[in-house]
Every structure is written in structure tokens, then in C-alpha cells.
Image: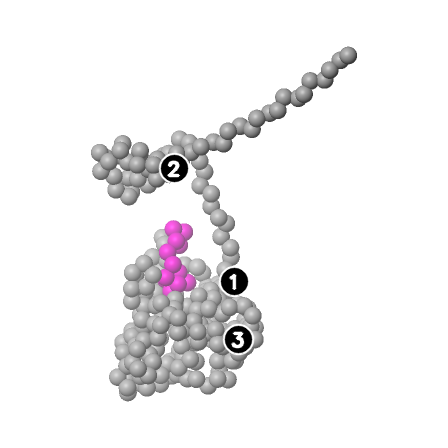
Amino acid sequence: MSTTSEPTAVRPAPPFLRTPAARKARQLAKDLRAERPDYAYLKEIVRHLRKELGIEVQRTPKKLPYVPTEEEIRRFYAAVWTARRGQDVILIKTLLYTGVRVAELVRVRLDDVDLDAYRVRITAGKGGKDRIVPFPESFKEALALHIDGLRARRAAFLFESSWKKPYSDRGVRKILARYTQAAGITASISPHKLRHFLFTWLKTQGIDDALIQPYSGHETRQSLEIYSRLALANAQQQYQGVIDRFPV
């Protein structure tokens, strides 16, 4: 009588065990300590290690930022105008017209505004750099009245509370959130999205990236070489030439 043998059980391979990262770092440190490494040296070593081990850097694809539509911006500003809060109107128009970051906006002092040249000086913006941003000639009168009122009460900043304290980032965001809700807009309208809207809109008006770049406060390898050779006056002339078509 024939017998059928039982199949031999296949044992799973033992799990691959790595040395804990902290212990491996201590091991590597013993070899490296004599080199007195700094950050740049360590970064270069890691770059070569990736190359030796054939490890590619996994980059997360960047999502395109949400940019409000012109119709949303009109609805948003209509809610601002209906509320009849003068300082809010000036604040939101300043964000819309200049594209400054909220952290830059709350640091703008009265002396940073040049009404005759239609410019605002941004001091120590992102990366610690100063720059100049324009505003429309049509905005001069309203901005001048706002500044006169602030000077009368000895204010120092362009946007201050009645306690003579500059607005906070959070306070500005709450103001925008209130009007976004009043306008019935489901998407968030943040200061940064107003910034995206302005620069996207200027681009659609045919203004070259190299002219937008000095105002945006961004630095990219592609544009640095170009815009560094352009006169600021030329950029502002093009800005003033199209800003009257702005939806607000």
C-alpha cells in the first residue's frame, strides 16, 4: 500500500533586523568625531552615502495652491464693503493690492508708506530681506485718510488696535475668515490666498514673471538672474498700467 508523505512546511524567512538608528548614529560618530564635522560636511557625507547605496530621495509631489476665482474675490470684497468697517477695508485692500505676507503686513509702520511714490517698504521680509511693493494710485486717497487718522492718535503701525498694539497674524486671519463666511464662500480665503490671487491675476494680464518677482519676495534660480537686471520703476509702471482692471 502506498503512502503519501506530508508536505514539508516552509518556514518563513526571519525578519530582517536593522540596527536601531540611534545606535548606528553612535557607531558612525566614533569614526566621524576625529573629523570635527560641521553641518555642511555631514550633509555632503549623506549625499555620497545615498549614491553609494543607490538610494533615491523620495520627493512628495507639490500640490498646486488653491487660487480664488474673480467671482469669489468680488463676493468676498462685497461682504467687506457692506460691513462698513473702514480699517478692515483698508487692510484687505492692502493685502489684495500688494500681495504682502500677513507677517509682513502687521509689521508695516506708517513711515514705511510712501504715498507720493505709491509704494510700501517691507522691512526684513521672508529671508530677512527688504523690498518695495506698489499700490494703485487710486488707493492713495483712502490710504492717506487712514494714515492721517492713525497719526492723530499717535499710532506707529499701519494697522493697530485702539490699545496701540499692532495687529497679530491670528487677528488678521480671523478678520478674513469672518468675511469669507459672510460672503457664503466655502473655501478658505486666507491672506496667502489673496497673495496667490494677485500674482496669478498679474500673470494673466501679461506681466512677466521677472517683473512680478521683486514684489513677491520670492527668489528662484530661474528668475534671479533676469530680474536683478530690471529697473524697479519699469516693474511699477507695468503694475500701474493694469491694476485699474483689478476686480476690487
Q: In this view, does 91 lie above or below 222?
A: below
The percent coordinates of residue 15 (x first, y second) are 49, 32
Q: What kind of element bears circle 3?
A: helix
Front-most of residues 208 and 54: 54
Q: What kind of element bears circle 2?
A: loop
The percent coordinates of residue 225 (x first, y second) are 36, 53
Residue that badge 3 annotates: 181
Measured in 3D between alpha carbons, the distance from the residue under mark 3 to the one under mark 1, in whole angstroms, is 17 Å
Q: How crowded is mark 1: few (under 14 residues within 10 Å), some or many (20 or more)?
A: few
- In percent of the image, x 53 and y 75: which residue is there? 181
Q: Quadrant of residue 28?
A: top left
Q: In this rendering, which labeled residue sits more in front, label 3 or label 1?
A: 3
Q: Residue 20 carries which label?
A: 2
- In percent of the image, x 35 and y 85: which residue is there? 145
Q: In which quarter of the image is residue 25?
A: top left
At label 1, the amino acid type is Tyr
Q: In this rendering, which labeled residue sits more in front, label 2 or label 1?
A: 2
Q: In this rendering, which labeled residue sits more in front, label 2 or label 3?
A: 2
Q: How crowded is mark 2: few (under 14 residues within 10 Å), some or many (20 or more)?
A: few
Give yes or no for residue 142 being in the magenta stretch.
Answer: no
Measured in 3D between alpha carbons, the distance from the residue under mark 2 to the one under mark 1, in whole angstroms, is 41 Å
The percent coordinates of residue 54 (x first, y second) are 44, 32
Front-most of residues 215 and 68: 68
Residue that badge 1 annotates: 66
The percent coordinates of residue 12 (x first, y second) are 56, 28
- Horizontal side, residue 8 vs residue 81: left or right: right
At label 2, the amino acid type is Pro
- In percent of the image, x 26 and y 33: which residue is there? 30
Mark 3 and mark 2 in contact (Cβ < 8 Å)? no
Magenta residues (range): 212-223
Q: Is residue 245 visible?
A: no
